Amino acid sequence: MLGKSNFQYIGTSDGMTDTQTLDDLGKLLKTKADLLRFVNEETREIIAKAKINELERQRKTLEDKLQEVYELKLRIQEKKLGEGVSQEDVRSWTEQTKANNTTPIEDAIAELETVIETTKGNVQRQKENVAAQVRDEQYQEKL
């Protein structure tokens, strides 16, 4: 495996620079993956509340953070390949990284989507029921 690189780049939209070493990027990936898991720990509680705004915010946060982890993982792979690390070694690194285990996050996002749709449907039915009840009461008053 090759050591630190002097690869120069002036920055990216996520605040990272390519002057960072692979070690720095690896630490950043670990931090982002840890944050993603940390944020996901709140998902159960948010689902239990069933408040649409909170559900949607949690889903968006998880999606955004998952995308950041994915993009950073790709940058590390690209940098490793650019520094001459073999594809086999890059593949091995990818399989070993905890950031590669995104299944619990993807499952949480899918569950949030289901709960959001169900909750929106319930709210809509409640509104329709109230409207129907008001119409019935108005009809009964006319009789």
Image (cartoon, rainbow, N blue to C red):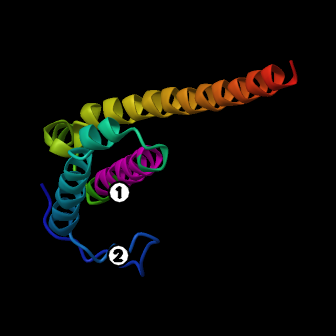
Vertical arrangement, residue 63 with respect to residue 103, above or below = below
Q: Residue at x 32, y 29 (%)?
A: 107
With 84 as the anchor, is 118 left or right in this view?
A: right
Task: State the residue position of label 1.
Answer: 75
**Which residue is at a point 25% across and 58% down the rendered structure image?**
32
30 or 26: nearer the eye?
30
Q: Hey, which quadrant is residue 4 in on the image?
A: bottom left
Label 1: which secondary element: helix
For label 1, the crowd category at 10 Å Cα-Cα, with few meaning under 14, some 14 to 19 and many 20 or more, is some
Q: Is residue 69 magenta?
A: yes
Compared to 101, does 78 lie above or below?
below
Quarter occupied by the N terminus: bottom left
The residue singled out by tag 2 in the image is 17
Q: Quadrant of the C terminus?
A: top right
Q: Which residues are magenta?
A: 55-77
Most extreme residue toward the bottom is 10
Real-space CA distance between mark 1 and mark 2, rounded to the nearest whole angstrom: 11 Å
* Residue 89 lies in quadrant: top left
**Towards the viewer: 15 or 24:** 15
> Which callout, 1 or 2, points at the residue further toward the start of the chain?
2
SS category of the residue bearing label 2: loop
Q: Amino acid at mark 2?
A: Thr
Is residue 41 in the magenta section? no
Q: Taken as a whole, is the magenta stretch helix, strand or loop?
A: helix
